[in-house]
């Protein structure tokens, strides 16, 4: 009588657990196959272009600060990178990005505690930091009485590009560099690269496979392991109950 009572219950839960396990195994199998062919599908180069997916990572918009150069080109900063047009030039992590012309076809870009020296063709020439006695912190770049200068807190310093020195000055006029909006095609190119650097399809597949996307972490694999254990036990119980029934 007891076997007749337990066998239907075991069957019912065995099927339910089996269906749940199928979903989890499909999840792991599909993401695992995608990760095995990351290079074939170029997942690392494909940014997440869907707002819903980006919201999983807390990304709502790309912060871009841009300055137009005299040659009608643009220097921009987005995330942790500096861009010439839509080509990534260097790392540049700062919340006070600014640009000033420092000579013929030569520009300085303020990136945190450094100045980056950039040519008019967008090539990085030099990274200027504390070893060059650069005034800290760099608040802004601009023109002091029509000459390129660095603002550090309330102090101003004229820039000597050839000697890489900084002459204190009390300017009559200071004109900080002014940001400008980017043309849409350049902005789109920067956004794609920025999002790709932050989150791409490879990272999404890794996070899905490991269960990190929905905050599951190691619990996903724990759930799969526990379901397999319970499924094995219920299957064994069904087999044992059926065997005893046939022998009785």
Image (tube, rainbow, N blue to C red):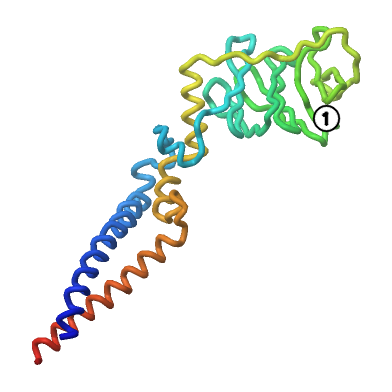
Q: Dividing the image into 4 quarters, which one contains the C terminus?
A: bottom left
Q: Mark 1 = which residue?
A: 134
Q: Position of residue 90 (x, y in %)?
A: 62, 32
Secondary structure of residue under mark 1: loop
Q: Position of residue 181 (x, y in %)?
A: 57, 14
Identify the residue at horizontal 63%, vertical 16% (top origin). 67
Quadrant hosting residue 180: top right
Q: Position of residue 6 (x, y in %)?
A: 20, 79
**Residue 109 vertical position relative to residue 27 in the rendered view, above or below:** above
Q: Is residue 212 left or right of residue 179?
A: left
Identify the residue at horizontal 21%, vertical 73% (top origin). 9
Identify the residue at horizontal 35%, vertical 52% (top origin). 31
Quadrant hosting residue 145: top right
Frontmost residue, 157 versus 198: 198
Quadrant hosting residue 7: bottom left
Q: Is residue 100 left or right of residue 216?
A: right
Frontmost residue, 187 versus 90: 187
């Amino acid at each position: 009588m007891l076997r007749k009572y337990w066998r239907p219950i075991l069957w019912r839960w065995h099927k339910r657990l089996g269906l749940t396990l199928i979903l989890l195994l499909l999840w792991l199998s599909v993401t695992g196959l995608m990760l095995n062919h990351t290079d074939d599908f170029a997942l690392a180069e494909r940014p997440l272009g869907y707002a819903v997916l980006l919201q999983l990572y807390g990304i709502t918009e790309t912060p871009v600060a841009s300055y137009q150069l005299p040659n009608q080109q643009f220097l921009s900063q987005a995330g942790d990178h500096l861009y010439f047009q839509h080509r990534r030039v260097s790392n540049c992590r700062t919340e006070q990005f600014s640009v000033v012309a420092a000579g013929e076809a030569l520009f300085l870009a303020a990136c945190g505690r450094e100045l980056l020296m950039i040519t008019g063709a967008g090539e990085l020439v030099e990274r200027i930091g504390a070893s060059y006695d650069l005034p800290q912190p760099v608040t802004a770049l601009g023109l002091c009485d029509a000459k390129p200068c660095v603002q550090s807190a309330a102090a101003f310093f004229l820039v000597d590009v050839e000697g890489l020195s900084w002459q204190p000055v009390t300017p009559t006029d200071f004109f900080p560099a002014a940001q400008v909006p980017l043309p849409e095609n350049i902005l789109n190119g920067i956004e794609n690269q920025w999002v790709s650097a932050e989150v791409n399809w490879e990272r999404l597949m890794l996070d899905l496979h490991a269960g990190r996307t929905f905050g599951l972490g190691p619990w996903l694999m724990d759930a799969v392991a526990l379901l397999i254990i319970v499924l094995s036990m219920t299957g064994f119980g069904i087999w044992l109950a059926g065997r005893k029934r046939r022998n009785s």
